[in-house]
Image (tube, rainbow, N blue to C red):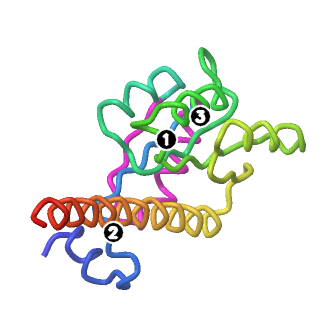
Amino acid sequence: MSEAETKTDTLPNTESFLPNSTVLIVDDNPQNVELLAAFLESLPVKLITAGDGIEALQKVEEHNPDLILLDVMMPRMSGFQVCRKLKNEPHTRDIQILMVTALNELGDIEQASECGTDDFVSKPVNKFELLTRVKSLLRVRHLKSELERALTYLSEVEQESTGSE
């Protein structure tokens, strides 16, 4: 049995969506990327990384992640700019974004909230807190997707029933 199968078999029923999840880690500091990836290693998710905001947008187009761990202070394009851009696009607005920041000023937290982040965590990152928030945000993403599918199905059923009368 492979390691991935073992991880999947031991998941609680409430986390069965994790193996189908993709997480994008965005940070210009390779040590931070490595640390976050190591923290998430215990989760059966697909991990991809980007070194700045521009690369993050490219990876989003390529991989359509479920969750982005997004550093705020980066060259070329800040995490705030990336978040704002993603939340303003219809095809990316439902991607969950967890801002990872060393900034603790109230103004920075307000700016993160205003640009549409779903949650944020301060550096230095606590592994348990990160895992808890990641699982929670992935659960939200999964439930939103299920709801969308159910609403689409109901709409189709309703159209069929009104069309056959």
Q: Quadrant of residue 103?
A: top right
Comes first in the chain, label 2 or label 1: 2
* Pointer 2 with pointer 1, Cβ within 8 A: no
Question: Does the segment drawn in magenta span residue 73?
Answer: no
- Up the image or down, 124 lies above or below 90; here it is below
Q: What is the x, y in percent for residue 56?
A: 46, 29
Asked whether 127 or 63 is in front, the reply is: 63
Residue behind mark 2: 17
- Up the image or down, 142 lies above or below 87; here it is below
Badge 1 marks a residue whose secondary structure is loop
- As drawn, the residue found furthest toward the left would be 164
* Position of the N terminus by quadrant: bottom left
Horizontal side of 148 relative to 140 (left or right) equals left
Q: Residue at x 69, y 29 (%)?
A: 73
Residue type at tag 3: Cys
The residues colored magenta run 28-50
- Up the image or down, 79 lies above or below 140; here it is above
Q: What is the x, y in percent for residue 139?
A: 46, 67
Q: What is the x, y in percent for residue 110?
A: 82, 42
Residue type at tag 1: Arg
Residue behind mark 3: 83
